[in-house]
Image (cartoon, rainbow, N blue to C red):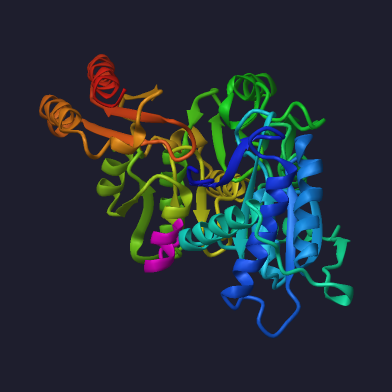
Amino acid sequence: MGRLFGTDGVRGVANADLTAEMALGLSVAAAHVLAEAGTFEGHRPVAVVGRDPRASGEFLEAAVVAGLASAGVDVLKVGVLPTPAVAYLTGVLGADLGVMLSASHNAMPDNGVKFFARGGHKLADELEDRIESVYEEHRTGAPWERPTGSGVGRVRSYGEGFDRYVAHLIAVLPNRLDGLKIVLDEAHGAAARVSPEAFTRAGAEIVTIGAEPDGLNINDGCGSTHLDKLKAAVIEHGADLGIAHDGDADRCLAVDHTGGEIDGDQILAVLALSMRERGVLRSDTVVATVMSNLGFKLAMEREGIQLVQAAVGDRYVLEEMKQHGYALGGEQSGHVIILDHATTGDGTLTGLMLAARVAQSGRSLRELASVMERLPQVLINVPDVDRSRVGESAELAAAVAEAERELGATGRVLLRPSGTEPLVRVMVEAADIEQARAVAGRLADAVKSALG
């Protein structure tokens, strides 16, 4: 069996890859593994369970809740809330476990199960491996130890979660957003209520799109993976900026007043300078991934901010931040972690902080983001290859070395096996877009030849 857990939980087509039986089994396995690890020692365990609005989340939530309660865990159902809200509530409520049902930016037929440890942090890889092992052992017939009588878990709804989370977002803002007009694209997802409420309470005049989830329309032509509607709405309404979330609102991309895209690297650059100015950018350091644009690295060097690069995946950014006490990190895709206020990427918090910088500085988002120049970057996904051999192929290593010699100091090459899909990502940066495309095309052909 291939590893169930990817870089962001267990994900697949709901009711095909990710079934109710699997969701239940994984939840029971998680409860047993955490009990073995001593997490529940001395008290009755509690879990927070939330989901995004996609239709399959309804039956998967029921399966997860049933699994946890059958393993003796009390469950607080918080309903449809963003992933970072579930993480926050897991921490603030002192829960032993958090579970989020979402496939993030994926299309509606997909769904996923993501576990949070006590404090609202993602589970360590070794715990995920143990959960998977225990799940597989019992899936093939080994009986569970099951509590009876008063030992079974109790289940109740926790409707207060919405207000507690929004209040937290407002409380950590450095300044209000009065005078700003902002378009919010909620991707018909988990932030459809939270984000408009938070921006309104913070003082902004808002226009919302993609804020009518019906269980089927999540990420459908809207949100952070489809910015065209947001660009048009910002221009139509004469807004100062636009904010786009994905389905579970753990990421944020933006649009300036001209309709120009502002990606995660640019958001990190703006927030890094803002946080340094306020004295809260610890060690004057920001953590990004190896996929960050070379222009971001050059901008941070010019501004005297140290850049630390981690493996792709916000969990690895977070590990680096926690290990060294850094305050800001994120990915080009819009996962931004502000560790003083969140334990995971938080799209609503990121958007609020970005807007707060615009309001405080009196400068447009376009001007603020111009601190960095994005170098041309070409990304090609090469499917149907053996992604596990990326680091072993001499043929591929030779092709990469030749590409790096051609690009010199003004470019960069990165080959990376996807953590969630059966493909290899080829990324090339260069000062010239045509050169980047040509080099990326040759490398994609080399990947097919060497790994196909």
Residue 440: image quadrant is top left
Identify the residue at image location x=15%, y=33%.
394
Q: Position of residue 225 (x, y in %)?
A: 57, 28
Work out whether residue 1 can be spotted. Answer: yes
Identify the residue at image location x=68%, y=46%.
22
Magenta segment, principal secondary structure? helix
Out of 218 and 8, give the one closest to the viewer.
Answer: 8
Out of 94 and 191, give the one closest to the viewer.
Answer: 94
Residue 372 vertical position relative to residue 309 in the rendered view, above or below: above
Residue 195 vertical position relative to residue 77 in the rendered view, above or below: above
Is 326 magenta? The answer is yes
Out of 143 and 199, give the one closest to the viewer.
Answer: 143
* Image quadrant containing the C terminus: top left
Q: Which residues are magenta?
A: 318-328
Q: Position of residue 72 (x, y in %)?
A: 78, 70
Work out whether residue 169 can be spotted. Answer: no
Residue 291: image quadrant is top left
* Left or right of residue 133, residue 235 in this image: right
Is 78 magenta? The answer is no
Identify the residue at image location x=51%, y=40%.
334
Q: How many marks?
A: 0
* Left or right of residue 116, residue 28 in this image: right
Outermost bottom residue: 42
Identify the residue at image location x=57%, y=42%.
251
* Left or right of residue 114, residue 159 in this image: right
Q: Position of residue 358 (x, y in %)?
A: 55, 43
